[in-house]
Image (cartoon, rainbow, N blue to C red):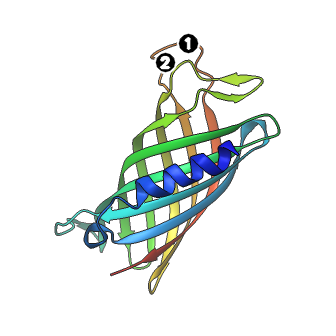
Amino acid sequence: MIRKKIAAAAAAWLCTFPSYATNALALEIGRGEDRTSLLRFAVVERWNREPPALGHKWQLTGYWDFSAALWDNAVESTADLAITPVFRFERGPLYLEAAIGLHLVQTRISASRVFSTAFQFGEHVGIGWRSGHWDFAARLQHLSNAGLDHPNPGINFVLVRAQYELH
């Protein structure tokens, strides 16, 4: 029951973003420590500026990623709301990206993993491929409070992402 309430609240929060500002919608699935599964929905807003060229046709671009996620394992379900600026290095359809964002997470992840604070930093690195309106990526993500308080067990995820460009 609580999962449905969390999912409904997250969906309502994401629907508050105006459609004119939304450039893409994304869905991510992954697996983390403690056999934790992750399902994330994101709204993407690209930065509106000319990307600087980095030589040999590499370009630096970026976007804001506003997301809501549900983590689930045998013991607990956890909600996650995040805002993340993502830096992307593009060359043709191929890209590399890196990000560090702010997450609000329920503190209890599993019987052996409890965060000391709901505030967490989430950083990721990824590689992806764009094709038409679609964008596919693989990511490695780490979340922790960067040692601001203890315990700070952190958690790592391996993720795959599908994103659909609206414009």
Residue displayed at 42% across by 53% down = 13
Please state which of residues 98 and 7 is positioned toward the viewer in this rendering. Answer: 7
The residue indicated by pointer 1 is 150
User: Which residue is most to the right?
Assistant: 74
Residue 53's place in the image compared with 39, above or below, is below
Front disc: 1 or 2: 1
- Choose top left, top right, bottom left or bottom right for residue 71: top right
Q: Position of residue 67 (x, y in %)?
A: 46, 53
> On the picture, is 8 further left or further right than 35?
left
Dot 2: element: loop
The Cα atoms of the two marked residues, 1 and 2, are separated by 7 Å
Numbered circles on residues, count: 2
- Choose top left, top right, bottom left or bottom right for residue 113: top right
- Choose top left, top right, bottom left or bottom right for residue 108: top right
Mark sitting on residue 136 = none
The residue indicated by pointer 2 is 147
Residue displayed at 64% across by 38% down = 78
Q: Position of residue 118 (x, y in %)?
A: 50, 27
Q: Amino acid at mark 1?
A: His
Please state which of residues 40 and 134 is positioned toward the viewer in this rendering. Answer: 40
Q: Amino acid at mark 2?
A: Gly
Q: Position of residue 25 (x, y in %)?
A: 45, 69
Circles 1, 2 touching at the beta carbon (< 8 Å)? yes
User: Which residue is most to the left?
Assistant: 49
Please state which of residues 160 and 125 is positioned toward the viewer in this rendering. Answer: 160
Q: Position of residue 152 (x, y in %)?
A: 58, 20
Residue displayed at 40% across by 42% down = 101
Tell me if mark 1 has few (under 14), some (14-19) or many (20+) residues whose alpha carbon lies within 10 angstroms of its own: few
Tell me if mark 2 has few (under 14), some (14-19) or many (20+) residues whose alpha carbon lies within 10 angstroms of its own: few
Dot 1: element: loop
Quarter of the picture holding the C terminus: bottom left
> On the picture, is 5 further left or further right than 111?
left
